[in-house]
Image: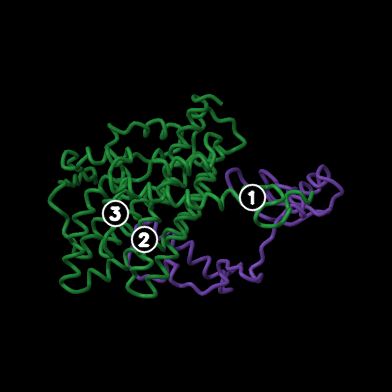
Amino acid sequence: MNIEQVKERAGPREFGPSDEMPEPYRKAATRMIQFHANSEIMGALIERPFIRQAPSLERKLAVSAQVQDEIGHGQLLYRAAEQLGVKTREEMLDELADGRGKFLNCFHYPLDHWYELPMIMFFVDGAAMRRQASLKRTSWEPYAHAIDKICFEEGFHIKHGEDILREIATGSRRDKELLQDAFEKWWPRILQFFGPTDDDSTHGGFAQEVGLKTMSNDDLRNAFLNAYLPKAEKYGLEIPEYPRIEYDESRDHYEIENSDLDWAEFETVSKNEYPPGREQIDSRGRRQEAVDWVREAIMDDSTTAVTGTTGAAAD
Amino acid sequence: MRFEVFRQEKRKEYHQHVGDVHAPDMELAKQYAQVIHARRKPANSLWVVPKDEIGTVDADEQSVEMGGTTQKQYRWATNFATGEMPEEIEESEREQQSVERDAAGESDD
């Protein structure tokens, strides 16, 4: 298939491993799915400390289940990406470890406090879910299959996130103040979640033409605001004056004043050069290195493998 | 030899297990599968897999914990009452509800 044929046929779940896909398609799909997989892993890592910090056993169990889910999503997605034949799973994990692998802006910022957790678990995961739901119709079938399972599990994450938000928002005056502080700190990053406006998006056009993406960044951001602004208000959160958001009733559209957002910082974050984010990457890289010997032992199919079995040689 | 058969009803759908066939080799197994499992019911594609090649994990094996074998309410969307949710969250919850109902043996089918 050439690119023109791909664009013509592009539709939900249209292409799979048995189709000869042209290189630009395979590269674009790899870039997109690898980014998604990396984000699952890095998101799980910043949530993980809250298994220990959870204020109750119920929360501890739920946060731990959620972190397990996210790591599983990462694995599913690397598999879907691997089938494009551009990069192996090992290459993608190595790229994440050495700082070449890119991932979502929000996961470059440290989470310092329990009050900040719902910013990730409710708003960021909610934004991610919005985007993921639109990917059930992506043209790369293995990606859509991974998304089916991710979406099944993700409903729990967002409802649990909202439940934490509700609990804090109905707490003491101090709880509410700390929650509002966390919200103001995270709100601009959340607005940047969907990336720059469509005019400035480098890869969006092609990805949409070949059916990998089904909605533009702007439309996704707008749908997210439509659903989640009322939720923020429901819990008494005050939307900061800046960045300015104008609602255009005739178009049912939220217009964000782009110049109110720090796109220079976003750029630094996107390049993996934001120091706290870099530290998260390096910390994960060191851990990957520390358990290298386990991976090697598993991959080693010689008869001296650590499992002590000779399964591969039995035939 | 025994072969397990998976049928995909329409393009883009998942292949689902529909039964097995006995045959001396793959060639005949594919023909039997076609005749037995795809002659009347609509099918777009069949997967025919030698039974011996299939690895199995059973829920009652020791140290195996699979969905439905554990009581873990905290990881279900239905465990949290947060009012009206965005459509994609409601959909995720409906999928979880239907799995929970099946697990409880209340399914219609």
Q: Which one is nearer the viewer's eye here, B64 or B90?
A: B64
Residue at label 1? Answer: B15
The reply to whether dot 2 and dot 3 touch (C-beta < 8 Å) is no
Q: Which one is nearer the viewer's eye here, B78 or A275?
A: A275
* SS for dot 2: helix
Residue at label 2? Answer: A158
Nearer the observer: mark 3 or 1; the answer is 3
Chain letter for purple? Answer: B
Q: Which one is nearer the viewer's eye here, B42 or B31?
A: B31
Q: Tell me the number on the disc at residue B3.
A: none
Nearer the observer: mark 2 or 1; the answer is 2
Q: Is residue A202 above or below residue B100?
A: above
- Give the Cα distance between marks 3 and 1: 42 Å
Question: What residue do we see at 37% from left, 47% from top?
Answer: A281
Q: Tell me the number on the disc at residue A110.
A: 3
Whether residue A154 is visible here, answered yes or no, is yes
Chain letter for green? Answer: A
* SS for dot 1: loop
The reply to whether dot 3 and dot 1 touch (C-beta < 8 Å) is no
